């Protein structure tokens, strides 16, 4: 059973045929923080302490006017949630809806959805890391695509 996964090991595990632009962020509060890209989606690979878990974190923003309008209407927001809810629920880890200040909030006030998956040393491997990054990216892309598709539909009356 492993009790530590080093930064060098994680960097070695990042498959540069699929995962690109591994950029190290210097942050005094973490052991390391890499921003990687998968299909042009940024995902952070973070380890806060030497013996802690590796956190895989991705964020999808509701950064268009159409997306924000969609979230503010009860019926349309429900339609969006009907599509993205099952995807978010099936993504390994957990998700949190965040407002402008990055505080947890209701979907109607969301600016972003953050998905996070944790790899603990005893379960960490190249396959687990890659699977986690791909799952986060798949979820992010799905939320983006569904938000755009539902936003593009004719508005439903908010009676």
Image (cartoon, grey):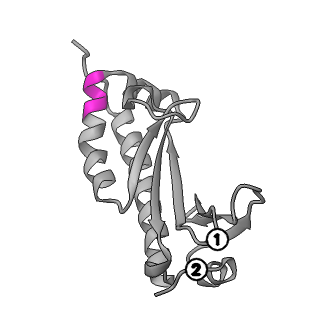
Query: Where 116 sits versus 23, above or below?
Result: above
Q: Position of residue 144 (x, y in %)?
A: 44, 47
In the rendered image, which residue does mark 2 sit on?
4
Q: Which residues are magenta?
A: 74-78
Q: Position of residue 122 (x, y in %)?
A: 45, 80
Residue 76 included in the magenta stretch of the image: yes
121 left or right of 12 in image:
left
**Quadrant position of the C terminus in the picture:** top left
Please state which of residues 46 and 112 is positioned toward the viewer in this rendering. 46
Q: How many circles with numbers are drawn on the protein?
A: 2
58 left or right of 106 in image:
right
Q: Earlier in the sequence, mark 1 or mark 2?
A: 2
User: Please, what secondary structure does the residue beneath circle 1 have?
Assistant: loop
Q: Position of residue 83 (x, y in %)?
A: 26, 45
Question: For mark 2, does the 10 Å Cα neighbourhood hold few (<14), some (14 to 19), or many (20 or more) residues?
Answer: some
Q: In the rendered image, which quarter is residue 153 located in?
A: top left
Label 2 near label 1: C-beta < 8 Å? yes
In the rendered image, which residue does mark 1 sit on?
50
């Amino acid at each position: 059973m492993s009790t530590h996964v080093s930064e060098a090991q994680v960097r070695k595990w990042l498959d540069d045929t699929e995962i690109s632009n591994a950029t190290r962020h210097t942050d005094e509060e973490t052991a390391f923080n890499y921003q990687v890209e998968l299909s042009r989606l940024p995902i952070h690979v973070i380890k806060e302490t030497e013996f802690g878990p590796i956190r895989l974190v991705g964020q999808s923003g509701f950064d268009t006017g159409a997306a924000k309008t969609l979230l503010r209407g009860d019926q349309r927001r429900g339609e969006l949630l009907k599509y993205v809810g099952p995807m978010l629920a099936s993504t390994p880890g957990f998700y949190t809806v965040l407002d402008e200040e990055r505080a947890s909030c209701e979907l109607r006030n969301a600016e972003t959805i953050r998905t996070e998956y944790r790899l603990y040393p005893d379960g960490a491997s190249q396959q687990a890391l890659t699977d986690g990054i791909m799952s986060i990216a798949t979820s992010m892309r799905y939320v983006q695509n569904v938000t755009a598709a539902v936003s593009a539909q004719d508005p439903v009356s908010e009676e």
